[in-house]
Amino acid sequence: MNSTLTTSAVRERLHTLVVIDVRTPGEYAGGHLPGAHNVPLDDLEHALPALREVADRGDLLMVCASGARSQKAGITLFSNGIPAASLEGGTAAWASAGGELHHPAATAAPTWAMDRQVRLTAGSFVLLGLLLGVLIHPAFQLISAGIAAGLVYSALSNSCAMASLLGKLPYNRTRRADLTNTLAALRDN
């Protein structure tokens, strides 16, 4: 199994690591570790050949917001014979420990961080379920109950089905040209 590195260990070794941020492009744009390359988790399979080349030359560090997606990415890499470590606690822990976050040049349409998108979507569905339950039929309150159950499961399992679904929306997806450029930059490292 792949290893997990603390923020202090990463700080000491950052200059020797190739950092792969597996969050969505919008999350990445919100702030990432210095030198990180954005390869969203959904695009990881496509990036395996380039990541294999990079791992042959140096150590890979997988990063996400909290550490859950980077652990998942590490498992995928490990199952394909590519060693990688994961940042314990993700960019949230990095920032909390005083680590610097870089922001790419502003884009025309910045997207919200995934946790903000999840809060908006979950809150909207809860409100919709309550309103429809009062105005039309009480059975619509099951929408609110379903969202609440999903949030509890998300907290207990440290995974989020809603974030996975939202990550597939067009504004959260990497443009193929951007991924191609990222993979080319990784190969040139």
Image (cartoon, helix red, strand yellow):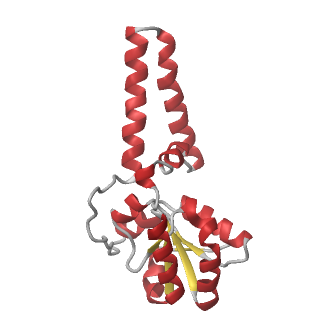
Left/right placement of residue 1 relative to residue 115 reads: right
Visible residue check, residue 9: no
At x 56%, y 50%, the residue is: 158
What is the quadrant of the N terminus in the image? bottom right
Visible residue check, residue 38: yes
Seen in the picture, residue 95 relative to 50 is either above or below; the reply is: above
Residue 168 position, x and y percent, is 51, 50
Seen in the picture, residue 136 relative to 173 is either above or below; the reply is: above
Residue 96 position, x and y percent, is 35, 66
At x 72%, y 72%, the residue is: 80
At x 42%, y 82%, the residue is: 11
In front here: 62 or 167?
167
Specify the quadrant of the image occupied by residue 108: bottom left
Left/right placement of residue 144 relative to residue 78 reads: left
Seen in the picture, residue 173 relative to 146 is either above or below; the reply is: below
Residue 90 position, x and y percent, is 47, 65
Seen in the picture, residue 94 relative to 9 is either above or below; the reply is: above
Q: Spot the residue most to the front.
A: 177
Residue 103 position, x and y percent, is 30, 70
User: How many numbered marks does the figure carry?
Assistant: 0
